[in-house]
Image: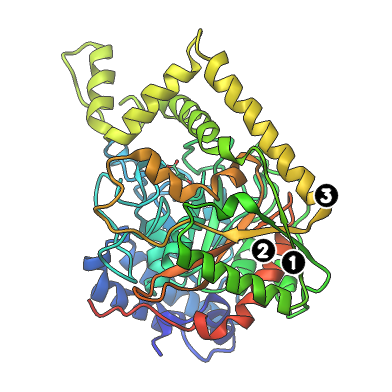
Amino acid sequence: MQLNELKAVDYLNMVKSREISVEEVVRDIFQQIDRIEHTLKAYLFINLEEALSEAKKMDRRIKDNDIPPLAGLPVAIKDNICIKGMETTCASRILKGFIPPYDATVTSRIKDAGAIIIGKTNLDEFSMGSTTKNSAFQVTLNPWDINRVPGGSSGGSAVTVASHETLIALGTDTGGSVRVPASFCGIVGIKPTYGRISRYGVISSSSSLDQVGILSKGVKDTAMLMNIISGYDPLDSTSSHISVPDFLLSCTGEGIKDLKFAVPKEFFKQELNIEVKERVADSLNKILKLGGEIEEISLPNLEYALSAYSIIAMAEASSNLAKFDGIQYGLRMEGSGDLEDMYLKTRSEGFGSEVKRRLILGTYFLSSGHYEDYYLKAKKIRNLIRKDFENIFQKYDLIIGPTTPIPPFEIEERIDNQLTMLLADTYTIPVNLAGLPALSINCGFTSKERLPVGLQIIGGPFQEEKMLRVAYNLEQELKEINTVEPNLLF
Ligand code: GLN
């Protein structure tokens, strides 16, 4: 086994007991990157020299018995999260050349804990998409089948983890952008409760929906990193004061006999692929076998979620992205000398077509005369959806179902119809609208093409511990599935 194939918690144990050095692991990671990155194209920036020098420094610290919690853990970071001194582009031409003068809070927390940043990962431009095809710079491929998309928008982060080009990664999730690529790449992806993790220094797409998440090779790895990055941050007024438990305690093999699960019937409609349905049914049987109780329920307003999401996400994006005008950040296209011309040229050159489409629609939804018909209505629907979930969580501990209705699709498919593409997020978007935590875990493969299938576990507000407990128990049950690896010999 190569050291880059280690899980994060195993790495930490081995480094701390001095069985392996940080440098050896980081070198194995760069060797892997050298071997496969030209095919997969998951990284936008590779931090080779700095990472190696950090690794050497960390080895010296460990030798001196100064061992921080993340002791040199290699982490990849989605390129919409700021790292001081490292170009951050959101995979958009408009931010080319933008070097943040500060770290995002998640970045400074993992750096302070001793992590090493391996690089910045590709995404759909400004997190708008479900494929990671929609980047201004490159198309990232799925390591399970390079003719297919890895999911998005945190597809770069998911691919670096699934193909062992890092040990763990950070992404962001506005409507499914951590869970969808986790599902398509056969790994674990968590979107915590809105407010659980600081968004300071994370370039906003839709502020009321965005949340930082973790992509990892195992549930314990997720719990371990949650412990480091969660918790109140005075720099983010939407971050929560709720105390942070030790999430690793949820991964102790304590059973799930006390838990009641709700399965929404709306998640099992005709658009659900038959093989996804079968794999999810297998997992439900495992839950029953473990002593969990399962009942079918209904979330009646779910059918309006996609429309409400689209309006809210676009409206917020149109406001958030107004600041990219050539003055302060990244690209500037000098026009005829007049300021307005410069704005126009910069924005028309800098943004890709999907971003432009959303900004134009978002501006329309917020304009006077249309605001009430669109934005206000969408917010009302959002409240109804939130109430639907609240009702369920009064009686049940968790909601469970597929993460996506379909397995990873081919790169050429679903390009023209944005709404069809959004269907990939049918089961993930309602969770962001309600601000709830959810996790995707691999629950098997399609029979012919051997493509990963994800199971989504949704919790009530700040109920990540229960989600992690179930995911950990299922992971034990699904051990033989979880040791299957993509064939990386392209
Ligand atoms: N695919 C969804 C969209 O295009 C969600 C993206 C995300 O979570 N950032 O908006």
The residues tagged by marks 2 and 1 sit, at their Cα atoms, a distance apart of 6 Å
Percent position of residue 428, x then y: 55, 50
Name which residue lies at 60% across and 60% down.
Answer: 401
- Kindly check if marks 2 and 3 are in contact, taking CB atoms under 8 A apart as contact: no
The residues tagged by marks 3 and 1 sit, at their Cα atoms, a distance apart of 24 Å
> Residue 304 occupies which quadrant of the picture?
top right
Closer to the camera, 43 or 117?
43
Colour setting: rainbow
Percent position of residue 176, x then y: 51, 50
Percent position of residue 255, x then y: 77, 77
Disc 2 or disc 3, which is closer to the eye?
A: 3
The kind of residue on which mark 3 rests is Gln
The kind of residue on which mark 1 rests is Asp
Q: Which residue is mark 2?
A: 227
Percent position of residue 239, x then y: 67, 42
> Residue 257 occupies which quadrant of the picture?
bottom right
Quadrant of the snapshot with the N terminus: bottom left
Closer to the camera, 131 or 155?
131
**Label 1: element kind:** loop
Closer to the camera, 280 or 326?
280
Crowdedness of circle 2 by 10 Å Cα count: few (<14), some, many (20+)?
Answer: some
Name which residue lies at 35% across and 75% down.
Answer: 448
Does the rendering let one see residue 313? yes
Q: Quadrant of ligand 1?
A: top left
- Kindly check if marks 2 and 1 are in contact, taking CB atoms under 8 A apart as contact: yes
Q: Is residue 463 above or below residue 51?
A: above
